[in-house]
Amino acid sequence: MKKSVYWGLSFLGIAALIIASSLNLLNGLGFWTVFLTIVFLSALVDGIVDFSVGNVAFSCAFLYMIWDGPLNLPHISAVSLLFAAFFTTIGLNLLLKRMRIEAFKNKHMKRFEAHIDSFEKNAERFEDGSNVEYDAGEHIMCRSRYGGMKKYITSQNLQSVLVDVSFGSGEIYFDQANAPTGVVDMEIDCSFGGIKIYIPRSWAIENNISNTMGSISTHGSPTGENLVTIKARGDINAGSIDIRYV
């Protein structure tokens, strides 16, 4: 079901709540208690459907705040609940990250180690320490940990890209690449880092990236040809992704 369905039902519930409040049918529950319950239950369902750990954790925290009094639950301060939700989000994302990456490799990179060996032998590198790489493989990894990375993808049969940036930065250029199938699968994990992605104007990005305390910005716009679609999934945790059409 689409998000609009969930939020549409939520607004219908709020409308019903207003009528029930006017008719004194809430049985002692305050208007705002029921109203906020509907809002955060909707966000909780939305997070479960989208597999968004942050939405689920923070929705549960706010629901606990709302109902600890009416249900006589053990009192936990709002600050403690929010910090717990924050660190739960980070912890579960880190644990799930490895599972997602391994699943992505199994789907696209069954001979992943062979690709790495080939890349080490054939990739061109600048010798000035700038960490610039060229990669012509079909399945490509872009990784940066505590440093910078600049990757020029020159593949003429690109199928998938795995991007892993933690406490660092990365620049990825697709303007020399080609994907005859018309689709490129991309898995992104960005934690406390920044990623810049440069793509041709004849390409498009389908963005399904979960965002926790991060940002995604786009500069420029595609021409509408959509010769290739990058299907981007993954997570941003306190990081940023900058998409630029060139």
Image (cartoon, rainbow, N blue to C red):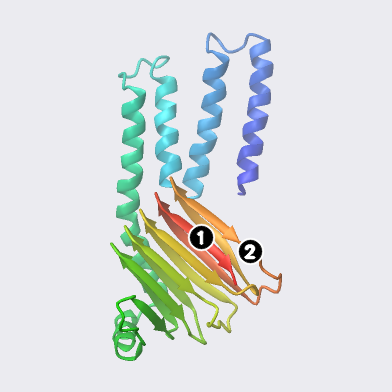
Name the residue: 49% across, 51% down.
215
Above-or-below relation of 79 to 47 = above
Above-or-below relation of 220 to 246 = above
Which residue position is annotated with label 1? 242
Check residue 61 in the rendering and tell me which mark sits there, or answer none. Answer: none
Name the residue: 64% across, 35% down.
9
Query: Percent from the top left, x then y, of residue 192?
Result: 35, 53
In depth, the one of 30 and 201 nearer the eye is 201
> Does the image show residue 51?
no
Check residue 220 in the rendering and tell me which mark sits there, or answer none. Answer: 2
Name the residue: 34% across, 67% down.
148
* Badge 2 vs badge 1, beta-carbon distance below 8 Å: no
The quadrant the C terminus occupies is bottom right
Residue type for callout 1 = Asp
Above-or-below relation of 197 to 86 = below
Report crowding for label 1: few under 14, some 14 to 19, many 20 or more residues within 10 A (C-alpha): some
Query: Percent from the top left, x then y, of residue 68?
Result: 38, 19
